[in-house]
Image (spheres, rainbow, N blue to C red):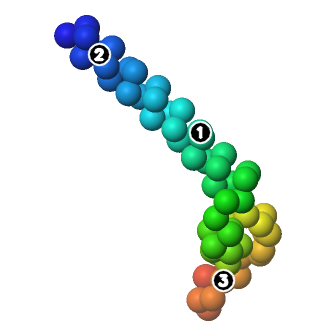
């Protein structure tokens, strides 16, 4: 049972390292310009805070 636990822990560590490397490649090195355009279009990278407006009448009563 210990060998299976060791394999699971090793796989989790390797997966975490690959996740960090892929996030670095995608965000910091700008290797995929199409991805940057999509993030700008969806508003993920900009921290613009807008006021929430109520659209249904009678909710402020």
Query: Which numbered disc flags the more N-terminal residue, 2 or 3?
Result: 2
* Residue 20, label in figure: 1
* Residue 21 higher or lower than 53, as above or below: above
Outermost residue on the front side: it is 31
* Residue 61 higher or lower than 33, as above or below: below
Mark 1 and mark 2 in contact (Cβ < 8 Å)?
no
Spot occupied by residue 3 in the image (x, y as percentages of width and height): 25, 11
Query: Which numbered disc flags the more N-terminal residue, 2 or 1?
Result: 2
User: Is 41 or 33 nearer to us in this picture?
Assistant: 33
Please tell me whether mark 1 sits on a helix, a strand or a loop: helix
Q: CA distance from mark 2 to mark 1?
A: 23 Å
The label nearer to you, 2 versus 3, is: 2
Q: Looking at the rendering, in which quadrant would you find the C terminus?
A: bottom right
* Residue 29, label in figure: none
Mark 3 and mark 1 in contact (Cβ < 8 Å)?
no
Q: CA distance from mark 1 to mark 3?
A: 40 Å
Residue under label 3, please give it. Answer: 54
Q: Looking at the rendering, in which quadrant would you find the N terminus?
A: top left
Residue under label 2, please give it. Answer: 5
| Residue 7 visible, this angle | yes
Packing grade of label 1 (10 A; few <14, some 14-19, many >=20) is few
User: Is 47 or 51 nearer to us in this picture?
Assistant: 47
Mark 3 and mark 2 in contact (Cβ < 8 Å)?
no
* Residue 37 higher or lower than 5, as above or below: below
The label nearer to you, 1 versus 3, is: 1
| Residue 43 visible, this angle | no
Query: Which numbered disc flags the more N-terminal residue, 1 or 3?
Result: 1
* Residue 34 higher or lower than 24, as above or below: below
């Amino acid at each position: 049972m210990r060998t299976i636990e060791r394999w699971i822990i090793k796989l989790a560590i390797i997966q975490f390292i690959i996740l960090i490397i892929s996030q670095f490649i995608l965000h910091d090195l700008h290797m995929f310009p199409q991805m940057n355009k999509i993030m700008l279009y969806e508003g993920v990278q900009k921290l613009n805070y807008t006021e929430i407006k109520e659209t249904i009448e009678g909710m402020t009563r």
